[in-house]
């Protein structure tokens, strides 16, 4: 403005100077109507002081400085927002029946949230009916047909409702309230207006505001800068974007987690922008974000995705995949699935077509059955989805024609191609496949049974026979019969999978990583040992009893390391359930207790002998050095027992060889010798 205003003003005088009084987007929410003890005290004291001044029982009340910056005919308060809002609400009450003041009231607006702004417009319009009601203003407003449900979650609106209730209570018996507030001579309620020039950009205002009051939350700050960015881009849905941000999108995240909805809300944007490689995964990502990198495509993705989620609460699977990715315990796989859904929403403009089901099914199968436990794996998977985005309308047909995608398991890609070809050709077989993919342990990886069926001209009955047997062996997170299943498999052969220099008996956890392999992988890899076991099982009888029968009737040679695991299951206790690792050292199988064999390891046959000795009441102690090639032996009284080249050797304390097994049953032979020696030693004692 050309002329500075330095007068002591009433609220209407301020309105007369400016066309707009705008609470800026970087200001905090209206706080004087909060329900905490401090706010209640401030509110009570302020309203009582105002009332006493209006009644003439005290001197006119000076509410101190209100200052800020001006832009032509607009005033933007830096300090005084709380007092101005309270005065505004008091004037609404006082002039509730005076339509001549309506245009003045419309000059007061909140930019912090579109919901706050729209709500204030409504109570200006509806103020007469609100205050004439026998109900409290808050009750009357919330029961009104024009009240938007999502406004319940706007803290400014909640504070306004509380303040309106208290204003009506305090001033209900105050006569001539409007006349007193209009008194240009006595001016019972005033404040000192101060215009501050050259405050700089909004960043400077933000610093000053934080120095004076409660800092903005991360979500509020992010929202302010995000809205600023979309406004600069001038998108045709900018207004709707802002309204939805404060209304139905807020309701969406509130309904998911009302205690921490702001953090959940913010996490949605964080994951989306991480997937776009615009921000990093750290707690301060929104502070360090370059908002100029948020382009039109990203805004459309946000808009279409959140509208779809808000408008389709019954789509539980889509909601689950999105909210899994914004959970604190999210994995790289969760982020990849989140990206798949948001890519579809962008491409489809937020409209669900028949293709969504296949899009989610296929990419979910690929994601959950690929190793994505490093950031490099994650980025390759994101790039892979981007590379096939144009096939969003017909992904099933794309894979049926041997379509390719990067960033995922080659084996799973091949499986999806085979399944797509069958699904496109045989609806009955397709339904069986869909049902099989629902098994929570395998999460869509069904290729073992699938390839058995393909070998028989894609016979769905062959697939069903094998899949029914596989599925009954596993529950949600592990094989139902644990080590009994492993022992039964060992009867048919060495089923172990190679992990670098190690072999693994395959862990329970179905979430495969680069460091180990699980039963899920074993039962998905056309393993001949697995097929022999499945061919033996009969679903009409107890699976557990059949496994026990297989183990008890094993004909595995007694000098084979598998014999030890089959017959002495306590050996499994020496292995970490997270790895179940073995290693061949000098043609002998050793047990690796943890991930690496650099520590102390146990010989399989020595472990079995230890168990047998303990059953006979003979004490023995494992001895030896650390490392793969270390000397491992049992110490038993005056004897040292080793297992080398398929036989036990027993030496005395002078390192003289006193016994060596020669049969194909080394365990029984060594036990007999040591038992006799122990008896003789006992007799001597």
Image: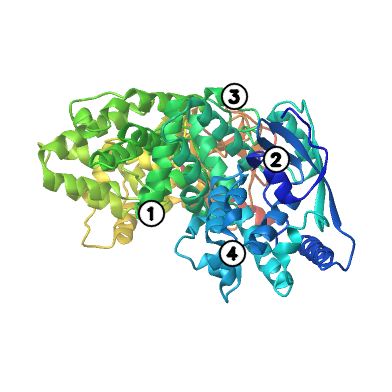
Marks 4 and 3 in Cβ contact (< 8 Å): no
* Residue for badge 2: 17
Who is closer to the viewer here, 459 or 484? 459
* Residue for badge 1: 313
In space, the residues marked 2 and 4 are separated at their CA atoms by 23 Å
In space, the residues marked 4 and 1 are separated at their CA atoms by 42 Å
Q: Which mark sits nearer the N-terminus, 2 or 1?
A: 2
Q: Give the number of the mark in front: 3 or 2.
A: 2
Q: Which mark sits nearer the N-terminus, 4 or 1?
A: 4
Question: Percent position (x, y) of residue 57?
Answer: 88, 68
Residue neighbourhood size for the residue with mark 2, other residues' Cα within 10 Å, grouped as few (<14), some (14–19), many (≥20):
some
Dot 2 lies on which element? helix
Dot 1 lies on which element? loop
For residue 333, which quarter of the picture? top left
In space, the residues marked 2 and 1 are separated at their CA atoms by 48 Å
* Residue for badge 4: 97
Dot 4 lies on which element? loop
Marks 2 and 1 in Cβ contact (< 8 Å): no
Residue 332 visible, this angle:
yes
Question: Percent position (x, y) of residue 62?
Answer: 85, 53
**Residue drawn at x 22%, y 29% as measured from the top left:** 399
* Marker count (numbered): 4
**Residue drawn at x 90%, y 61% as measured from the top left:** 59
In space, the residues marked 4 and 3 are separated at their CA atoms by 49 Å
Which mark, residue 471?
Answer: none
Residue most extreme to the front: 185
For residue 599, which quarter of the picture? top right
Answer above or below: position of 499 versus 310. Answer: above
* Residue for badge 3: 290
Q: Which mark sits nearer the N-terminus, 2 or 4?
A: 2
In space, the residues marked 3 and 1 are separated at their CA atoms by 33 Å
């Amino acid at each position: 403005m050309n002329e500075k205003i330095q007068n002591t003003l009433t609220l209407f005088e301020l309105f007369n100077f400016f066309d707009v009084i705008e609470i800026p987007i970087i200001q905090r929410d209206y706080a004087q109507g909060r329900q905490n003890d401090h706010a209640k005290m401030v509110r009570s004291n302020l309203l009582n002081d105002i009332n006493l001044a209006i009644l003439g029982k005290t001197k006119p009340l000076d509410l101190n400085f209100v200052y800020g910056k001006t832009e032509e005919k607009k005033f933007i308060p830096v300090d005084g927002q709380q007092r101005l809002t309270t005065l505004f609400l008091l004037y609404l009450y006082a002039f509730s029946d005076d339509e001549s003041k309506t245009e003045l009231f419309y000059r007061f607006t909140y930019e912090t949230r579109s919901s706050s702004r729209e709500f204030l417009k409504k109570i200006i319009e509806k103020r007469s009916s609100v205050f004439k009601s026998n109900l409290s203003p808050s009750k009357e407003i919330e029961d009104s047909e024009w009240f938007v449900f999502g406004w319940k979650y706007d803290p400014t609106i909640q504070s306004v409702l509380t303040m309106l209730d208290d204003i009506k209570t305090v001033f209900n018996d105050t006569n001539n309230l409007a006349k007193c507030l209009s008194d240009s001579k006595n001016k019972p309620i005033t404040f000192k207006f101060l215009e501050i020039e050259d405050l700089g950009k909004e960043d400077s205002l933000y610093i000053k505001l934080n120095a004076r009051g409660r800092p903005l939350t991360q979500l509020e700050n992010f929202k302010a800068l995000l809205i600023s960015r979309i406004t600069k881009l001038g998108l045709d849905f900018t207004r709707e974007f802002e309204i939805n941000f404060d209304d139905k999108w807020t309701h969406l995240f509130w309904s998911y987690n009302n205690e921490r909805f702001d953090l959940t809300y913010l996490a949605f944007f964080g994951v989306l922008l991480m997937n776009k490689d615009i921000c990093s995964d750290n707690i301060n990502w929104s502070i360090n974000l370059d908002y100029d990198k948020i382009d039109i495509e990203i805004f459309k993705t946000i808009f279409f995705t959140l509208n779809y989620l808000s408008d389709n609460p019954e789509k539980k699977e889509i909601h689950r995949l999105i909210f899994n990715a914004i959970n604190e315990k999210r994995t790289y796989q969760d982020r990849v699935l989140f990206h798949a859904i948001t890519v579809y929403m962008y491409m489809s403009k937020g409209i669900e077509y028949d293709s969504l089901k296949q899009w989610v099914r296929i990419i979910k199968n690929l994601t959950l059955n690929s190793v994505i436990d490093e950031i490099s794996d994650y980025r390759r998977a994101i790039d892979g989805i981007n590379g096939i985005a144009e096939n969003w309308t017909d992904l099933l047909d794309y894979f049926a024609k041997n379509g390719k995608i990067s960033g995922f398991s080659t084996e799973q890609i091949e499986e999806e191609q085979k399944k797509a070809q069958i699904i496109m050709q045989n609806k009955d077989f397709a339904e069986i496949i869909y049902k099989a993919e629902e098994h929570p342990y395998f999460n869509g990886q069904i290729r073992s049974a699938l390839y058995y069926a393909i070998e028989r001209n894609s016979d769905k009955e062959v697939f069903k026979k094998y899949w029914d047997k596989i599925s009954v062996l596993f529950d949600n997170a592990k094989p139902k019969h644990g080590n009994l299943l492993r022992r039964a498999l060992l009867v048919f052969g060495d089923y172990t999978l190679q992990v670098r220099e190690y072999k693994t008996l395959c862990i329970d956890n179905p979430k495969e990583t680069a460091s180990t392999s699980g039963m899920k992988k074993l039962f998905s890899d056309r393993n001949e040992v697995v097929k022999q076991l499945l061919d033996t099982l009969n679903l009409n009888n107890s699976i557990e009893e059949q496994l026990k029968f297989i183990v008890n009737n094993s004909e595995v040679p007694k000098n084979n390391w598998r014999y030890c695991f089959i017959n002495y299951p306590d050996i499994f206790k020496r292995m970490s359930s997270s790895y179940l690792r073995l290693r061949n050292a000098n043609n002998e199988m050793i047990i690796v207790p943890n991930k690496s064999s650099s520590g102390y390891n146990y010989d399989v046959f020595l472990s079995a002998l230890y168990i047998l000795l303990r059953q006979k009441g003979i004490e023995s102690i494992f001895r030896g050095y650390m490392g793969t090639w270390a000397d491992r032996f049992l110490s038993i009284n005056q004897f040292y027992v080793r297992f080398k080249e398929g036989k036990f050797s027993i030496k005395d304390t002078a390192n003289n060889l006193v016994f060596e097994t020669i049969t194909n049953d080394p365990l029984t032979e060594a036990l007999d010798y040591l038992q006799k020696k122990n008896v003789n030693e006992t007799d001597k004692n």
